[in-house]
Image: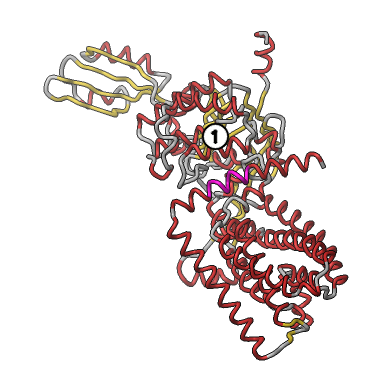
């Protein structure tokens, strides 16, 4: 345990350096920084409008009223903001370029966790602005719905949300290991990104088969639906059961997929 | 440490390779558009034996040159030794570690510098990468400052480490790459084409640096290079690989004994001689009978070199005669071309 804490602190120190580099880099290209930030805000705004339009035609969707749906929506985009900031660009680069070009060699040579080096090396600081906007929206919705949120359910939500983030990371990286076998596989991540758009709607509005898929094969329900349900007191026991089942499974799959993938890694010719 | 202890340590192998094999399965694409369409549904694969059953040991402090043509298996071997690739078969030990376990204790003791890949952050000054490596390799402040000063001094890069990497020349970048790789004082250094693309002056500078690093830190260095000058100047021992097989492992000069069939006789004549006359003594490589200078270069069998020289002195108006070994690169080229390998 002590060793784990030490390793965590060490990786945090390295990450601090990486963040500082990225910030310096971003400041050097500020126009690009602002344009990307605007693009992200525009992207989120379009989905927000779609959600509002849907609720002009109905008051309840799968048991979710408008304010609950907006909370779900904001949490989805908080997750996307966090994943973009932390590892999504790393995952995309890994699948599109680093395996194919053999640049992954440089990550493997370092005496640090190889997944950390591969996926956390390129934080996307542009995502901060839009993440803050959706965070404000989330806080607003939480206050509106505060009559149905107890302190216990809020603490339960925070813990479940962190675990769901871990599940989502483990699953994305497991998919990324496809690159070890097919060299260039960024289409897989683009597919997951597209499919993730469904995470903005309550999972229970979809047919049973798709619901199962969103909880297992492509667990986008963990992006926001599961923690939101826990926050709003909907099927709390079922949601926690799902987290406790999927978390160890995704952890084991991630470990095995990564280990076997590394064995298959063939680098690139010099 | 006593001299005897030091000698004992130096005599221990730090790299052990036994029957190493590394095969790759590659997709064989048929030519043309139709070939591409067919490959969507059915593909033919073949096994490429990049490294095929090689064994060797390298002792501490040795500088060894890996020689071989493109695709001979040099880089693959270095990548297996660095733990980047899993071997298909065989045993490998570096500093008593299995490289592909990739233990941090092992990774902190070696460095791999690839001439065609860079770890420096492109848009930031090299100094930023050095600081990142300080955190990654957990280098204490004092050691970092001392090593950095020394390396910067040896490579004469004081004025460039705070300039954006993308604004540096290839040679300057390579020097900074070396610093980034050596900040943690690795005991084993793998250099894959470190001088590729550099001009001759820069090549010489880097060679001098590698030599002094080896002497100062008693580091074991394994070097691959297309430039024979790198190997000749730095390494006493050479390992030649051809099509994944090890064909020679020994002192560089022994390559001449093993593979050179001829010696070179350089001749200066006091008066004009005919080409026909000269042909009787060996194969003419160069014949120059212009104005007041009469010279020629002959290739003669190694066994008969002394006898031929004596005959030449007797029969022709020789002013000066030199017997030389052929250049090592020519011998190696001949080895690969003739299929002696």
- Relative depth, front residue between B150 and B41: B150
Residue A201 as seen in the image, left or right of residue A19? right
Q: Quadrant of residue A51?
A: bottom right
Q: Above or below — where is A238 with respect to A111?
A: below
Residue B329 as seen in the image, left or right of residue B97? left
Q: Quadrant of residue A3?
A: top right
Residue B173 as seen in the image, left or right of residue A219? left
x, y percentage for residue B318?
A: 23, 13
Query: Per the image, is A20 magenta?
Result: yes
x, y percentage for residue B149?
A: 50, 25
- Chain identity of mark 1: B
Q: Which residues are magenta?
A: A14-22
x, y percentage for residue B120?
A: 50, 42
Name of the residue lying farthest toward the bottom? A57
x, y percentage for residue A218?
A: 72, 70
Element carrying mark 1: helix
Confirm whether residue A218 shows in the render.
no
Residue B235 as seen in the image, left or right of residue B266? right
**Residue where numbered disc 1 is placed:** B181
Confirm whether residue A113 shows in the render.
yes
Q: Above or below — where is B52 with respect to A83?
A: above
- Relative depth, front residue between B225 and B247: B225
Q: Quadrant of the N terminus of chain B?
A: top right
């Amino acid at each position: 345990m002590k060793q784990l804490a030490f390793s965590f602190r060490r990786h945090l120190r390295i990450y601090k350096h990486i963040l500082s580099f990225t910030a310096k880099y971003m400041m050097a290209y500020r126009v690009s920084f602002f344009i990307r930030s605007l693009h992200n805000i525009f992207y989120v705004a379009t989905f927000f409008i779609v959600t509002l339009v849907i609720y002009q035609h109905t008051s309840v969707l799968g048991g979710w009223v408008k304010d609950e749906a907006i909370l779900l929506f904001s949490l989805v985009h908080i997750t996307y903001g966090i994943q973009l900031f932390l590892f999504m660009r790393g995952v995309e680069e890994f699948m599109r370029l680093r395996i194919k070009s053999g640049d992954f060699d440089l990550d493997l040579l370092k005496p640090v966790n190889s997944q950390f080096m591969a996926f956390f090396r390129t934080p996307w600081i542009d995502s901060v602005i839009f993440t803050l906007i959706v965070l404000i929206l989330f806080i607003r919705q939480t206050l509106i719905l505060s009559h149905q949120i107890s302190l216990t359910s809020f603490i339960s939500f925070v813990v479940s949300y962190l675990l769901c983030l871990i599940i989502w990371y483990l699953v994305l990286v497991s998919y990324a290991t496809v690159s070890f076998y097919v060299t260039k596989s960024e289409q897989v991540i683009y597919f997951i990104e597209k499919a993730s758009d469904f995470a903005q709607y309550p999972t229970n509005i979809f047919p049973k088969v798709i619901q199962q898929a969103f909880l297992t094969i492509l667990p986008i329900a963990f992006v926001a639906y599961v923690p939101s349900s826990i926050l709003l007191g909907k099927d709390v026991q079922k949601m926690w059961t799902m987290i406790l089942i999927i978390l160890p499974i995704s952890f084991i799959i991630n470990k095995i997929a990564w280990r076997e993938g590394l064995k298959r890694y063939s680098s690139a010719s010099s | 440490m006593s001299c005897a202890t030091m000698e004992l340590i130096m005599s221990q192998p730090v790299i052990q390779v036994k029957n190493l094999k590394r095969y790759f399965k590659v997709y064989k694409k048929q030519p043309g558009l139709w070939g591409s369409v067919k490959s969507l549904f059915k593909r033919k694969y073949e096994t490429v034996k990049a490294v095929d059953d090689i064994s060797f040991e390298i002792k501490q402090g040795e500088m060894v040159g890996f020689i071989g043509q493109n695709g001979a298996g040099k880089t693959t071997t270095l990548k297996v030794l660095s733990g980047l690739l899993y071997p298909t078969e065989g045993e490998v030990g570096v500093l008593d570690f299995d490289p592909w376990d990739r233990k941090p204790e092992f990774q902190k003791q070696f460095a791999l510098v690839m001439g065609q890949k860079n770890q420096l952050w492109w848009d930031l000054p090299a100094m930023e990468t050095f600081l990142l490596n300080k955190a990654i390799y957990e280098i204490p402040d004092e050691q970092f400052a001392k090593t950095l000063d020394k390396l910067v001094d040896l490579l004469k890069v004081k004025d460039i480490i705070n300039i954006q990497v993308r604004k540096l020349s290839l040679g300057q970048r390579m020097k900074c790459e070396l610093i980034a790789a050596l900040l943690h004082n690795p005991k084993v250094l793998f250099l894959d084409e470190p001088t590729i693309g550099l001009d001759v002056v820069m090549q010489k500078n880097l060679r001098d640096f590698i030599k002094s690093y080896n002497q100062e830190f008693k580091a074991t260095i394994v070097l691959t290079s297309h430039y024979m000058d790198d190997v000749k100047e730095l390494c006493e021992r050479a390992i030649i690989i051809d099509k994944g097989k090890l064909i020679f492992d020994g002192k560089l000069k022994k390559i001449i004994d093993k593979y050179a069939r001829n010696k070179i006789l350089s001749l200066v004549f006091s008066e004009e001689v005919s080409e026909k006359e000269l042909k009787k003594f060996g194969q003419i490589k160069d014949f120059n009978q212009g104005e007041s200078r009469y010279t020629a270069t002959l290739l003669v069998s190694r066994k008969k070199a002394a006898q031929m020289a004596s005959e030449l002195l007797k029969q022709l108006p020789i002013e000066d005669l030199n017997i030389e070994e052929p250049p090592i690169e020519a011998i190696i080229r001949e080895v690969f071309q003739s299929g002696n390998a």
